[in-house]
């Protein structure tokens, strides 16, 4: 027997964290009764989320996806811009972490809840690498080492100090940043604090997984060793 949230994560319906939110919201039933976080279940139990029966799929799949701007990572089938419409249909998968609608680049998709938890849990401090272009107005200084130093040292975002990160200036309006955390719209808010508006944000790496030359909008099957299948 395993904890309910972990079972749901293994099913590929959603991540373990999202499963906990469903339990809190009262969306989950176990054998016809409202679920509780302390519930332990097996494959013989009847688990439903919003009326849909959940079963563990033993076949784990992994995809790399080059998300274009305009795609929303929320899996809402009623939204024509939802990532749901770009996913493979043979198995239910979900993204590891998110990119906001205005950003593009690498997303890892899977039905492996345990792997998702390992990749997103803050204790593991996985690196995420981005290329960022900002608007430099005529009266503004181009990006320089002082900008990089302030970004790398940490700024207040969502009422908390960001962790130290790596920043390198690539041109007068473009920089590369490597984060080990993922606060909501973190890079955009950090840049805004220093007076610059982000006009293009592209994730090129998530830990050992690289976007490389995967075309925008394309999905490719990979394995955990980041080999294209």
Image (cartoon, rainbow, N blue to C red):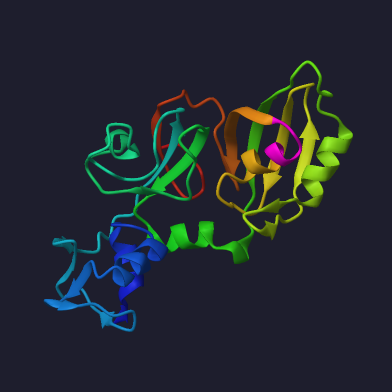
What residue do we see at 22% from left, 39% from top?
A: 78
- Where's residue 104, x and y in %? 51, 31
Q: As displayed, is residue 37 above or below residue 152? A: below
Q: Is residue 177 located in the magenta-colored stretch of the structure?
A: no
Q: Which quadrant holds the N terminus?
A: bottom left
Q: Which quadrant holds the C terminus?
A: top left
Name the side, left or right, on which 117 lies relative to 166. Answer: left
- In terms of image quadrants, where is residue 19? bottom left
Residue extending farthest to the top is 138
- In terms of image quadrants, where is residue 149? top right
Provide the residue span drawn in magenta.
Answer: 191-196
Asked whether 95 or 99 is in front, the reply is: 99
- Where's residue 124, x and y in %? 61, 62
Asked whether 71 or 128 is in front, the reply is: 71
Q: Is residue 193 located in the magenta-colored stretch of the structure?
A: yes
What residue do we see at 71% from left, 31% from top?
A: 196
Q: As displayed, is residue 86 above or below residue 116? A: above
Residue extending farthest to the right is 146
What residue do we see at 29% from left, 68% from top?
A: 25
Q: How many numbered marks, from 0 up?
A: 0
- Where's residue 81, x and y in %? 33, 32
- In terms of image quadrants, where is residue 65? top left
Residue extending farthest to the left is 32
Asked whether 229 or 219 is in front, the reply is: 219
Name the side, left or right, on which 144 lies relative to 55. Answer: right
- Where's residue 165, x and y in %? 75, 49
What residue do we see at 45% from left, 57% from top?
A: 116
């Amino acid at each position: 027997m395993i904890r309910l949230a972990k079972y749901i994560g293994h099913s590929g319906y959603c991540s373990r964290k999202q499963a906990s939110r469903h339990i809190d919201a009262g969306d989950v039933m176990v054998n016809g009764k409202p679920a509780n976080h302390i519930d332990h279940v097996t494959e013989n139990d009847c688990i439903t989320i919003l009326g849909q029966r959940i079963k563990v799929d033993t076949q784990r799949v992994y995809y790399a996806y080059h998300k274009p701007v305009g795609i929303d990572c929320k899996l809402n089938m009623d939204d024509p811009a939802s990532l749901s419409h770009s996913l493979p249909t043979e198995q239910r998968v979900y993204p590891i972490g998110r990119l906001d609608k205005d950003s593009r680049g690498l997303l890892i998709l899977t039905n492996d809840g345990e792997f998702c938890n390992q990749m997103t849990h803050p204790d593991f401090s996985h690196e995420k690498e981005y290329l960022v272009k900002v608007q430099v107005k005529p009266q503004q200084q181009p990006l320089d080492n002082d900008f990089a130093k302030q970004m790398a040292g940490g700024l207040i975002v969502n009422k908390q100090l960001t962790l130290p990160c790596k920043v390198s200036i690539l041109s007068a309006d473009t920089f590369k940043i490597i984060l080990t955390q993922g606060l909501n719209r973190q890079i955009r808010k950090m840049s805004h604090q220093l007076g610059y508006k982000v006009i293009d944000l592209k994730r090129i790496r998530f830990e050992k997984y690289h976007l490389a030359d995967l075309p925008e909008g394309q999905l490719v099957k990979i394995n955990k060793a980041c080999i294209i299948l």
